[in-house]
Amino acid sequence: MPREMFVMKKRPDAAAKGEATITHSQFCREAEGEASRETSPGQTGVPAWPIEMAETIWKTLRAPHSAHFLNSPAGRDFMTFEVGHISTVRRTAAPSRSPGSHWLLAATIVCGTVIGLSSQSLLMAEDKPIRVLMVTQSVGYVHGSVRRPADTLSPSEIAVKQLAQHDGWFTVDCTQDAAADFTRENLQNYQLVFFYTTGALPISTENLDYFFKDWLRQPGHGFVGTHSATDTFGDYMPYWDMIGGTFAEHPWNAGNTVTIAVHDTGFPAMKPFGKEFQIKDEIYRYKNWQPEKVRVLMSLDMAKTEPKRPFMVPVSWVKDYGKGRVFYTNLGHNEGTWTDPRFLEHLNLGMQWAAGKIDGDATPNPDVSAELEERAKKDAGQ
Ligand SMILES: [Zn+2]
């Protein structure tokens, strides 16, 4: 019976951070020996692990995205991994529950990449995964969440790659070169476009026009924006009219813990949050805000948030755009947000909705915005 597990590789920047410098192939050779001895004495070949153990390590890795396996049986410090891709494997031995099992599990999984476990995707028999183009180019402010150390991906890109690998319904290509990759021709390869960007991206007017007037209006096509996606293209109307608003200021800084009220608890992307929740993240106020065109899913609870301001502050919204869909969430400034399981599920479900994989009502709710505006004035003492 096929089993799912995660194939991981050592991050290329591990050595630069003063972490273990053992090479990939050395590690795998040694790890294979350890794991084989531990799990199936006298047998050779690749030990495999059941889904429960793969999930254990997945959870360990998911938050934070760099996981350290200290005090391994061989006395090494291990190590920073990122998830590779989903493989199917056969169980060949009972899993070890020895004290070193974390290390061994990691070792076993790494071995899979080198020895070449048959990695036919589990998704072969299901829907073909959709393709996502994730753009994290910063022409203005560069967030830590999109900064790529050395030649590896940024925290937000790793988080989305891990979502793709864990949930399997999409694959993602990450770019910080919009001029090369955000083109009419290349968009044909994708169903979702995802921006965590700032400033006037180097995309030609022709390609932008095509995106707004044609590509995004097609059924099954969607746009997902996190955080500074609204601090992109400034006052360029076709863009803010598409996404729903433009960054104006952020009275709530990265160190602020805010309380957010959920207005549509039935919308898929809201399910991880319940009726209200708290989070430490930078929250924007918007201009070019068009409540009549969007469905606000959640907003700041001004009564429970400092500093107080006499206006409504939307935090996530959705809208239909032709036959395509737009999902935006303000969250994501802090790197820690990209390892917050609530945020990751919020994003995952928002992406699925934007891609047309799941339903959710996007009927604009300007009445909710108007009521919140009045309430915020009272809560701020005006
Ligand atoms: Zn920010």
Image (cartoon, rainbow, N blue to C red):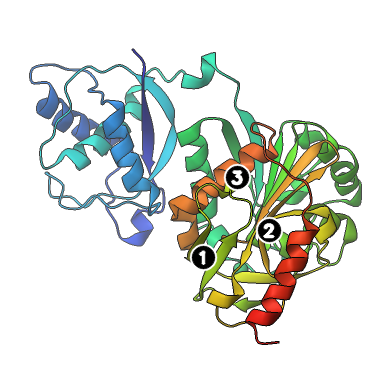
Q: Amino acid at mark 2?
A: Thr
Q: Position of residue 116 (x, y in %)?
A: 37, 22
Question: Of residues 108 and 284, which is closer to you in this image?
Answer: 284
Could you tell me which residue is drawn at 69 percent across and 40 percent down? 354
Q: Which amino acid is tagged 1?
A: Asn
Please tell me in which quarter of the rendered image ligand 1 is found. Answer: bottom right
- Who comes first in sequence, dot 1 or dot 3? 3
Q: Is residue 209 above or below residue 291?
A: above
Which residue was labeled with disc 2?
Answer: 197
Image quarter where the N terminus lies is: top left
- For marks 3 and 2, the one nearer the N-term is 2
Residue 109 visible in the displayed image? yes
Instruction: Give neighbour class at mark 2: few <14, some 14-19, many 20+ (Cα, 10 Å).
Output: many
- Point out residue 83 in the picture as x, y percentages from the top left corner: 41, 40
Q: CA distance from mark 2 to mark 1?
A: 14 Å
Element at badge 1?
A: loop
Task: Give the labeled residue for mark 1.
Answer: 334
Picture coordinates of residue 251, whole percent (x, y): 63, 79
176 sits to left or right of 322: left
Which residue is located at x 71 percent, y 87 percent?
Answer: 382
Given this view, does label 3 or label 2 mark the residue nearer the observer?
Answer: 3
131 vs 236, left or right, is left
Whichever of callouts 2 and 1 sits on the residue coming sooner in the sequence is 2
Say which mark, if any, is on residue 107.
Answer: none
Compare residues 333 and 360 and report the one nearer the observer: 360
Q: Which residue is mark 3?
A: 266
Q: Position of residue 280 (x, y in %)?
A: 49, 69
Q: Residues within 10 Å of mark 3 (few under 14, many from 20)?
A: few
Q: Residue furthest left?
A: 41
- Contact check, label 2 and label 1, Cβ < 8 Å: no
